Image (cartoon, rainbow, N blue to C red):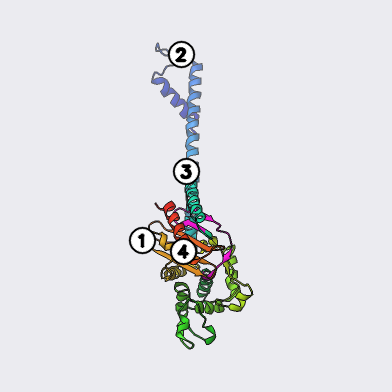
């Protein structure tokens, strides 16, 4: 604080400069009372300035301490990140989760209604029961007709088996490069090519996995079911939050079929699995890439693809029994989307199912892309 002497000197300087005070305009000396008032005012003003300066200095010190604390926290965080780096798969999952949340926020209700109307119109035209789920992978727009209705899965169950197998590959329980020797008891009919190799043939688990998806190999599927365990497959379904998908029998198990034992799924569950493959969360990024590679090599090209523009890339899986015909996967390209169409029920016939699939996919493409 300024001394009283300095305050008086300041007041005297103020008076000497001829500042306006009562009686000073005519060159008269200021009355003693006015002089005291002026000195007091000057002192008060000086005190305020000193107090403000003191507060500014304290504020600067506080700010400096805060900056030092922030710097220390940043340094500690950087050190922790360096010592404990996040797993790449965890970072990918966080990124995908963030993308999914952003997509959900961006969903336009009008687009959802338009997609729902388009799908419903196509389903209403079908001569049999049709369930479908479609999800736009660019903005999260999604709609379904009977998407949560359980139906016999046919070979669509192999998508869940693939996920469970790749989980065990990641865990180190089995390696894609390990080989398996075919046994006579492994060989079953239906779709596939492994049975043609005959007992004693040696194949890698990678080859078995790929054939299970791209040519829907039943022999290979049963080998992988035995490798991972049926219980593990169903545990994976629960862990992933699938509502309808169950593995209850091996492929071509006629005794189980005679007893009415069947495998099941629904369009919503399959759409979720295909979206995971696209997003890189089908176990992890490497597993997702392998799954996509197998889906792109699908040899059964009748169904959904017939309703898409010529030249469309469709990574998918199909399934067929005497009473059902299914197709589902990822339409890739500039505007990717997941589409699943499951057909069966009264009035089912395979060619009619494939025509209905094409009509649904054409409607979906028109609502989402065109």
Q: Are dots 4 and 3 in contact, CB under 8 Å?
A: no
Marker disc for residue 289: none
Q: Are dots 1 and 4 in contact, CB under 8 Å?
A: no
Marks 1/4: CA distance? Answer: 17 Å
Q: Which numbered disc flags the more N-terminal residue, 2 or 3?
A: 2
Q: Which numbered disc flags the more N-terminal residue, 4 or 2?
A: 2
Residue 322 among those drawn in magenta: no
Please tell me how crowded label 1 is: few (under 14), some (14-19), or many (20+) other residues with Cα within 10 Å: few
- Residue 134 place in picture, x, y as percent: 49, 57
Viewer-proximal residue, 175 or 86?
175
Which residues fall within the magenta stretch?
132-155
Residue picked out by circle 3: 60
Residue 19 visible here: yes
- Residue 366 place in picture, x, y as percent: 42, 53
Residue picked out by circle 2: 22
- Residue 183 place in picture, x, y as percent: 52, 86
Residue picked out by circle 1: 310
Viewer-proximal residue, 273 or 41?
273
């Amino acid at each position: 604080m300024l001394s009283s002497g300095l305050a008086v000197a300041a007041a005297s300087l103020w008076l000497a400069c001829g500042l306006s005070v009562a009686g000073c305009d005519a060159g008269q000396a200021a009355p003693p009372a006015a002089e005291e008032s002026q000195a007091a005012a000057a002192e008060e003003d000086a005190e305020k300035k000193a107090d403000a300066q003191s507060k500014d200095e304290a504020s600067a010190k506080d700010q400096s301490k805060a900056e030092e604390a922030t710097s220390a926290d940043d340094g500690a965080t950087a050190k922790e990140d360096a010592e404990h780096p996040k797993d790449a798969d965890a970072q990918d999952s966080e990124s995908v989760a963030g993308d999914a949340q952003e997509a959900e926020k961006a969903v336009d209700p009008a687009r959802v209604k338009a997609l729902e109307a388009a799908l419903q119109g196509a389903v209403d035209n079908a001569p049999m029961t049709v369930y479908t789920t479609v999800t736009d992978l660019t903005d999260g727009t999604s709609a379904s007709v009977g998407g949560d209705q359980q139906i016999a899965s046919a070979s669509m169950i192999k998508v869940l088996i693939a996920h469970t197998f790749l989980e065990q590959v990641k865990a180190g329980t089995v390696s894609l490069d390990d080989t398996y020797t075919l046994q006579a008891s492994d060989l079953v009919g239906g779709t596939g090519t492994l049975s043609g190799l005959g007992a004693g043939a040696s194949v890698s688990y990678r080859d078995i996995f790929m054939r299970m998806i791209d040519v829907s190999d039943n022999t290979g599927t049963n080998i992988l079911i035995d490798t991972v365990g049926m219980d593990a497959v169903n545990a994976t379904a629960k862990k992933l939050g699938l509502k309808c998908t169950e593995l209850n029998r091996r492929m071509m198990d006629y005794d189980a079929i005679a007893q009415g034992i069947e495998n099941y799924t629904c369009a919503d569950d399959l759409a979720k699995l295909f979206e995971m493959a696209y997003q890189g969360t089908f176990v992890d990024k490497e597993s997702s890439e392998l799954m996509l590679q197998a889906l792109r090599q699908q040899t059964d090209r009748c169904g959904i693809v017939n309703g898409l523009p010529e030249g469309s890339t469709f990574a998918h899986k199909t399934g067929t029994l005497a009473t059902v015909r299914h197709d589902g996967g990822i339409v890739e390209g500039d505007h990717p989307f997941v589409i699943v169409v499951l057909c069966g029920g009264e009035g089912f016939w395979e060619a009619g199912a494939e025509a209905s699939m094409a009509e649904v996919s054409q409607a979906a493409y028109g609502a989402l892309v065109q």
